[in-house]
Image (cartoon, rainbow, N blue to C red):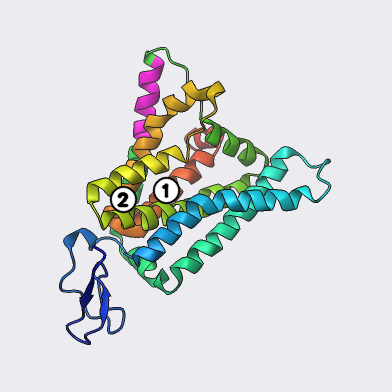
Amino acid sequence: MFKKVKCNHCEHSYDETFKECPKCHSPNGQLDPNFRNIQMLTFGKQLGLFATGSFGFSILGVIISLIISLFNTSSVSNTLLNMILNAVVYALLFIILFAIVNVDIKKLLSSFKKWQPYVAAVLCFLTIILFGMIYSMILQLAGVQISGNDNQQAIDVTSESYPLTALIIFGFIGPICEELTYRVGLFSFFKRINKYLAYAVTIIVFTLIHFNFDMANIANELLNLPYYIFAAFALTFMYDNYGFAGSVTAHILNNVVSLIPASVILGVFH
């Protein structure tokens, strides 16, 4: 799926995974059914999104950390420094990723015009929540104690001190950046080769980015893996069948609700 097709209307050559000719917008009569639900970009942009989103986050983190270290931060709490670091890094990453998408932003936004992705996203979110509840119950029945992994605990600490900033960063900007990186970028690229390979690679990579290899807490990290594997599959399924609108809406719903304190949620139903 790295070939080009020639438009029957204007004879312009373009990526065979595109739904329409980018020049005259005539429908691609040779489009593989596997690509009808997602907004494919060129494979160069797909690789660019994945490389930027996965490696760029760490690189930007190091650069911003070095800049912060130039200032006298002895009187600033570690929580505030982490919040500033995450806010700046995610903001820069957000801008860079959309700069890579560039004129193709219309392709991604086109899926938001339909109502189906929103309904599917709510169902996907509820399914992830249900899986998490059932999995937790099974562990409790087995007498196994589990807490949020290191990644989630760090987010919880920030959200307790700076709830609004955490909501913007981890509830909205973070999910959008991750969907551009791992679904629009990684999954779409590998789907050109094989659908099942694309699912496998995306689920593995997305799960591992939420995994901390700290041996001191490795048991807890491993116990959290099934939840992230399921969430990775669910979000990838959403993108594959409902496009960017489906996966990013489900991802945002999941993150936003996870940032709301349990006391607030219980209070609503009191």
Q: Nearer the viewer, residue 127 or 40?
A: 40
Alpha-carbon distance for marks 1 and 2? Answer: 10 Å
Q: Nearer the viewer, residue 179 or 30?
A: 30
Q: Who's the residue at 45% across and 50% down the image?
A: 252
The quarter of the displayed image where residue 23 is located: bottom left
Residue 234 visible, this orientation: no
Residue 29 visible, this orientation: yes
Instruction: Pinpoint residue 261: horizontal percent, then vertical percent.
Output: 56, 36
- Is residue 178 covered in magenta? no
Residue type highlighted by circle 2: Met
Q: Is residue 196 placed above or below 21 in the rendered structure?
A: above
Of all residues, the one furthest to the front in this rendering is 3
Instruction: Pinpoint residue 35: horizontal percent, then vertical percent.
Output: 23, 61
* Residue range of the region highlighted in magenta in the rendering: 128-140
Q: Which residue is mark 2?
A: 238
Q: Which residue is mark 1?
A: 251
Instruction: Pinpoint residue 148: horizontal percent, then vertical percent.
Output: 51, 29
Along the polypeptide, which appears first: circle 1 or circle 2? 2
Q: Quadrant of the N terminus?
A: bottom left
- Would residue 117 be found to the left or right of residue 54 on screen? left
Instruction: Pinpoint residue 130: horizontal percent, then vertical percent.
Output: 35, 33
Q: Who's the residue at 40% across and 36% down the image?
A: 228
